[in-house]
Image (tube, grey):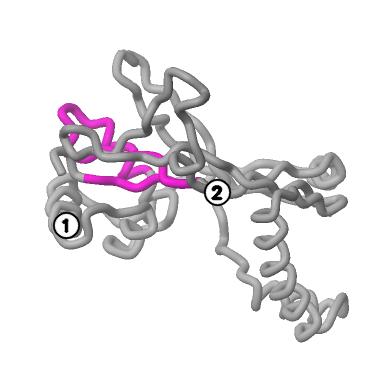
């Protein structure tokens, strides 16, 4: 079966000192298939009953967390390996900004300094082979129908949001402006890379949060 993967082209966030704008691609997704929808899909194709699938997923969710916390990584054959991602906690500096503490000696670093940042997933070779074994073509999707959001509107609304909530995420931007995931990320990339940006982003687990500078 032939498969067509839709993709979009986005500007790569520029770092201080960069003089040339580069671009990268992202898959243009139809939607996110959640557990209940996947259960319906499998049941409609006669693969497994919805009730059994949901029961297995609920138990897997519980046991996967317990196993990771008890010192195991978990390898699902043909799918991939799950493991905890640990990191050093961020603490406020003199300016009140959260920064990651550094250590000059391994003995200085204790369990009190650590946090769980997320879960890493490494796909199995079998899963990757299944993706590459199909006849695949690629089609570029242009975002001509995206809602226009002016810079002034973006700054005003996010400033108010930060005053109330302290920070925001890409999902918050999607909700506030009624744009797609990729349009929201494009707006955020432009926001933090603009000359004298009023907002900055910082890593928070596997994703990013955005804050107003000076807060």
In the displayed structure, 131 sits above or below 51; it is above
**Can you see residue 2?**
no
Label 1–label 2 contact, CB within 8 A:
no
Residue at the limit of the structure toward the front, as seen here? 107
The N terminus lies in quadrant = bottom right
**Left or right: 213 as drawn, with respect to 118:** left
Q: Nearer the viewer, residue 164 or 128?
A: 164
The residue at 69%/55% (across/down) is 70
In the displayed structure, 161 sits above or below 2; it is below
Number of marks in the image?
2
Which is more N-terminal, label 2 or label 1?
2
3D distance between C-alphas at marks 1 and 2 = 30 Å
- List x then y, in percent, for residue 29: 56, 55
127 is within the stretch colored magenta:
no
- List x then y, in percent, for residue 31: 55, 63
The residue at 68%/67% (across/down) is 61
Tag 1's secondary structure? helix
In the displayed structure, 143 sits above or below 213; it is below
Please give the range of residues in magenta: 186-211
The residue at 80%/42% (across/down) is 128
The numbered mark at residue 34 is none
Tag 2's secondary structure? strand
Q: Nearer the viewer, residue 64 or 9?
A: 64
The residue at 34%/22% (across/down) is 15
- List x then y, in percent, for residue 175: 33, 64
Snapshot quadrant of residue 36: bottom right
Determine which residue is flagged by label 2.
118
- List x then y, in percent, for residue 55: 75, 80
Instruction: Please identify, in this view, whether the residue under mark 1 or under mark 2 is nearer the observer.
Output: 2
Determine which residue is flagged by label 1.
157
């Amino acid at each position: 079966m032939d498969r067509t993967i839709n993709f979009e082209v986005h500007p790569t966030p520029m770092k201080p000192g960069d003089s040339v704008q580069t671009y990268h691609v992202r898959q243009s997704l139809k939607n996110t298939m959640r557990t209940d929808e996947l259960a319906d899909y499998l049941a409609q194709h006669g693969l497994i009953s919805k009730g059994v699938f949901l029961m297995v997923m609920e138990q897997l969710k519980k046991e996967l967390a317990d196993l990771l916390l008890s010192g195991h990584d978990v390898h699902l054959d043909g799918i991939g390996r799950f493991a905890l991602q640990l990191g050093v906690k961020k603490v406020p500096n003199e300016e009140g900004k959260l920064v990651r503490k550094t250590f000059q000696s391994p003995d200085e670093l204790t369990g009190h300094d650590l946090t769980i940042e997320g879960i890493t997933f490494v796909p199995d070779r079998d899963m990757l082979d299944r993706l590459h074994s199909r006849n695949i073509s690629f089609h570029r999707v242009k975002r001509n129908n995206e809602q226009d959001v002016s810079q002034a509107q973006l700054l005003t609304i996010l400033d108010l949001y930060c005053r109330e909530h302290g920070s925001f995420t890409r999902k918050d931007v999607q909700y506030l402006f009624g744009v797609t995931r990729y349009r929201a990320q494009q707006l955020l990339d432009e926001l933090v890379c603009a000359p004298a940006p009023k907002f900055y982003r910082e890593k928070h687990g596997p994703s990013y949060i955005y804050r107003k500078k000076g807060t």
